[in-house]
């Protein structure tokens, strides 16, 4: 939730400035858990700064956290930073290994996947996905004994959190159909009177489309009605019985 995560960001910033070393080591992974598959510029800059930290545990944690915040997004800024880090850590096997893992996460599923455990308009939390990410977070806190030691297979704990981030529309016989949809930034309409606009700055595209972390989609045609209230993942559409096609003169 947006305001809460901004408040946490501020607290984590204080820990970075005034906290002791064991606390500072936990900050990169805390930033990653707050922004999974949601690469915000401020967070990218903070993690980029921490990836050159004097303490190796902080630096390695920051590198894999960069992978987690960009997982499946193909973010160009993160890709450039990770390429620079690969050159910087060329002679350090542990650092290079972490950079390669982060790059793999960034291009996860060629940019069709996400590891964010929230779904249904960021309202519901998938407990299995979040539990698996918690295991990974604890492994990253002890990198040298787990992932960089003999327990590298603990990285596989990220798999239950992976899911596609597309929107595919199907008819009632579950055959894929292509319909125009509007995709734009989601607007928080809680407590507003009337029927306020659900999103801003939208573009009209044809399904299937990819939805980013803060995107929302709605049908741009009256020919079909959505069975689901939230346009996400696979959505079944049925024909609108009251639809009359426009007759072109």
Image: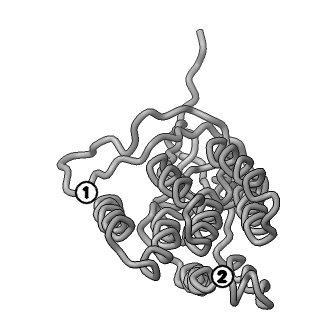
Q: On screen, 131 above or below 233?
A: below
Which numbered disc, 2 or 1, marks the residue closer to the eye? 2
Q: Position of residue 182 (x, y in %)?
A: 52, 38
The residue carrying mark 1 is: 190
Image disc number at residue 112: none
Q: Nearer the viewer, residue 73 or 234?
A: 73
Q: Where residue 158 sits in the image (x, y, percent)?
A: 68, 77
Report x, y in % for residue 101: 75, 66
What residue sits 81% from the left and 69% below the top? Answer: 93
Counting from the top left corner in percent of width and height, residue 172 is at 68, 59
Q: Quadrant of residue 86?
A: bottom right
Q: Nearer the viewer, residue 110 or 28?
A: 28
Position of the C terminus by quadrant: top right
Residue at disc 2, secondary structure? loop
Q: Is residue 237 left or right of residue 11?
A: right
Residue 226: tell me if it is visible. no
Q: Please name the residue shown 78% across and 66% down the image.
A: 92
The numbered mark, 2 or 1, whose residue comes first in the sequence reads: 2
Quarter in which the N terminus is drawn: bottom left
Judge by depth and name the residue closer to the eye, 32 or 172: 32
Q: Is residue 238 above or below residue 133?
A: above
**Is residue 195 shown above or below 226?**
above
With 123 as the anchor, is 134 left or right in this view? right
C-beta proximity under 8 Å, tags 2 and 1: no
Residue farthest to the front? 54
Quarter location, residue 8 = bottom left
What numbered label is drawn on residue 143?
A: 2
Tell me the crowding category of disc 1: few under 14, some 14 to 19, or many 20 or more residues within 10 angstroms, Cα based.
few
Q: Is residue 29 left or right of residue 86?
A: left
- Mark 2 closeness class: few <14, some 14–19, many ≥20 residues within 10 Å: some
């Amino acid at each position: 939730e947006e305001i809460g995560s901004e408040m946490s960001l501020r607290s984590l910033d204080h820990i970075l400035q005034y906290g002791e070393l064991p606390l500072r080591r936990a900050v990169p992974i805390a930033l990653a858990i707050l922004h999974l598959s949601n690469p915000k510029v401020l967070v990218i800059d903070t993690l980029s700064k921490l990836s050159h930290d004097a303490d190796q545990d902080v630096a390695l944690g920051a590198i894999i956290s960069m992978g987690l915040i960009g997982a499946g997004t193909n973010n160009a800024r993160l890709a450039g930073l990770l390429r620079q880090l690969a050159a910087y850590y060329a002679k350090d096997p542990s650092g290079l290994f972490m950079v390669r893992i982060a790059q793999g996460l960034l291009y996860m599923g060629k940019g069709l996947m996400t590891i964010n455990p929230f779904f249904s308009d960021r309202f519901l939390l998938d407990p299995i996905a979040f539990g698996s990410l918690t295991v990974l977070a604890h492994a990253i806190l002890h990198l040298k004994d787990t992932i960089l030691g003999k327990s590298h297979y603990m990285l596989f704990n990220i798999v239950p959190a992976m899911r596609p981030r597309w929107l595919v529309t199907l008819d009632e016989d579950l055959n894929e159909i292509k319909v125009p949809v509007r995709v734009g930034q989601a607007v928080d309409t809680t407590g507003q009177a009337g029927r306020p606009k659900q999103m801003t700055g939208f573009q009209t595209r044809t399904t299937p489309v990819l939805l980013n972390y803060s995107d929302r989609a709605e049908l741009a045609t009256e020919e079909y009605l959505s069975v689901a209230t939230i346009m996400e993942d696979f959505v079944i559409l049925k024909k609108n019985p009251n639809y009359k096609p426009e007759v072109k003169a």
